[in-house]
Structures are given as C-alpha cells and as structure tokens.
Image (cartoon, helix red, strand yellow):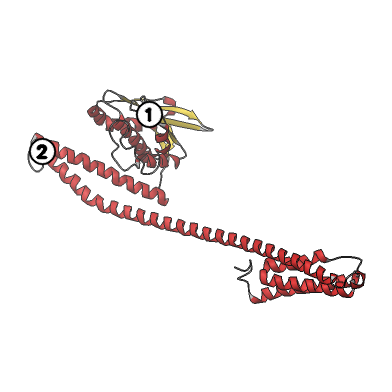
Amino acid sequence: MDGPFEHSTPRSRTRWFALALVLTLALGAVDYATGVELSFSIFYLIPVSLAAWFLGRRPAVLVSVLGALTWLWNDHFIGGNVYSHALIPYWNAGVRLGVFLIVSLIVSRLAVALEQERHANRELARSFAALDEMRKQQLQLKDQLLSNVSHELRTPLTAVHQFVTLLLDGVAGDLGPQQKEYLGIVLRNVHQLSRMIKDLLDATRIEAGKLTLEQQPLALDELVGETLSTLQPRAAEAGVSLHAELRSDATNVHADRTRVRQVLFNLVDNALKFTPPGGSVVVRTLRRDEGAGFACVSVSDTGPGMSAGVQEKLFQRLYQEGKEGVGSRKGLGLGLFISRELVTRQGGRMWVESTPGIGSTFSFTL
C-alpha cells in the first residue's frame, strides 16, 4: 500500500504530483525574489508533505530532491558570496534534503497507517454485515423449518387426539381401568405436544412480526375465573391449593382476550409445576398507576423460588431452568418468552419477584 490514494485514477495522481512540483518551484521563485533577507526553507515542507500524504513515499522523495535543488540554486547564486566557504550552500542543501526526506517518510507512513486502519474498519464492517446477513438467513430458515414442521405435525397429532378421545368415550367398545389409564397418559402427552407446537408457531410469528392482536374491552375477573376453572383439576391432582383474590376496581381492561388467557394459563401452569404438594398458588388483580390506569395481574406460588441469576435469564427464548427447584421443566422454554412478548405488544410489561426457598410471583400489567 503506497498511500491513501493508491486506488485513485492516474490523472488525479498526476495532478497532485504536478501541484507539489509547481508549489516547490513557486516557493523557489519567491525565495529568489526576496534574496537573503528572508528564509522560506520551512515552507518547502508543504509540497513534500502533500506528496507524501496523497501520493506516497516515492513521489515525496522526488519533490524533496527538487526542493533541495531549488534551495541550493538560490543559496549558491544569491547568498553564496556571504558564506566563508563555497561548500556551505551544498551543506545547507544536504541538511534540508535530509529533513525533507525524514518528513516525507513520517508523513507517508502516517498516511499508510491511517489508510490501513480505514481499510480494516471497512473490512470489519463488511464482515459484520455478512455475519448479520447470515444470521438473518439462518433465523429465516430456522423459522421456516419450525413453521413447516409444526404445521406438518398438527395433522397427525389431531388424528391421534381424535381417536384416543373416541376410545376413551367407549365408541369402539368398553375399556378396562388399565386401558383407560394408559389412554389418559397418551392424551395428556398429546395435549403437551399440541402446546409445544402452538408455542413454536407463536414464537415464529413474534420474531417474524406477523403476530396479530385484537384488543377490546375485557372483564378480567371473568377471564381469571375461567382459567382457574380449567386448571383446578390439575391443581387438585398435584395437591396444590389454587384460588384467586380479585379487586373490583381492576377488572376492566383493554386487551386481546385469547392472548391474555394464554399468558395467564402459562403463568398458572408454571406455578403448579414448581409448587410442591401442600403448597398454594394465588392469582391476584389490583389497580396500578403508571402514568395511566393499569390493571396488574400477579401469580404467586410457594415453590422453591429462584436465584437472581435465573431471574435475569428467565424470559429469554428457549431458556430452561434445568433441574433447579422441584421437578424439571417440561417444554421448550418458550412459554415465558411468548408471554412477555404478548404483554409487551399490548402496552404492558411483565416481571418476576422471587426469593429462594419461599416462592415466586410473576406479574404483568394491562
């Protein structure tokens, strides 16, 4: 690399070189006209520096030589008679040539270093852009794959659900207790797979910006009652007390009914998973003023609680706690990610408060 303008056109390089030469000769003419009264040696560094910066070291050396020769010509024919020795003008010209060459070397290296830094920054920017494009393509392919797989899985899963339900209803004949128990296990796993597929589709729509919400007036207490009624059998089976504490002044909200029910179901379902037998899960509503009227819904449990490090990661996509606490999380780690996105896109927010050994409280506003 010879200079910042190494990729410039030959015409532009010629112009810069011609400018440096003309400027050097012009300084020589002014120097000659003023005679011995003034010294313009410092100004010869201007064309040298221009040549070094814009054209590189070699053109700067030529300009330096021209500047030294111009100085020698003036010094020899104008001021030669004032020196005690005839070689002094040549000595002066040699010293100035050395100074010019040093300056040209320093300036050209600075120019090359700056251009190398700019080139590295451009390459780095291109690399980041390429990586970002690759990441977007990977996400697009992944989301497309998830969407296609999810849609393909729903058809056979629906068929399994229908036929298992028919068997449990006795349409194909009477079943024994053990057969009903086994089919019940199948049906529960079918429901779990259905929820996973639904979560995959929702996560894909969220990241693709295709999630639609239909916000309208909503009676929050009715929705809480419906959700708890659905999950009461699950709570009874787990030996966990499930009840609600509702405030009458926090019942009417403006939100998407289906999505709020999905959020509430996810939070209560998670609370039941991690609450040991004999514990309790409480759903509360209250009014919260955050610059405007907001209703706040909280789901509290008496589970094992979570550390601060877990709380920071809890709402990340695909995050799972592993084996911390009671039992292990069953699912894809998308429920809380989707729930927070659904709340955020409706103008609210979601957070968690937890103390290890005491329990956790998940809250969101509408």
Given contact means CB atoms under 8 Å apart, are the residues at marks 2 and 1 in contact?
no
What's the amino acid at mark 1? Ser
What's the amino acid at mark 2? Gln
Q: Position of residue 329 (x, y in %)?
A: 30, 37
Of circles 2 and 1, which is in front? 1
Q: Position of residue 277 (x, y in %)?
A: 26, 25
Residue 55 visible to an observer of this rendering: no
Instruction: Say which residue appears at 42% left-offset and 58% top-offset.
Output: 134
Instruction: Say which residue appears at 70% left-offset and 66% top-offset.
Output: 104
Instruction: Provide the secondary structure element on which disc 2 rests.
Output: helix
Q: Residue furthest front?
A: 85
- Given residues 76 and 342, the one toward you in this image is 76
Q: Residues within 10 Å of mark 2 (few under 14, many from 20)?
A: few
Instruction: Say which residue appears at 42% left-offset and 39% top-offset.
Output: 343
Name the mark on residue 360: 1
> For the C terminus, which image quadrant?
top left
Q: Does 303 appear above or below 349?
A: above
Q: Position of residue 56 (x, y in %)?
A: 66, 69
> For the N terminus, which image quadrant?
bottom right
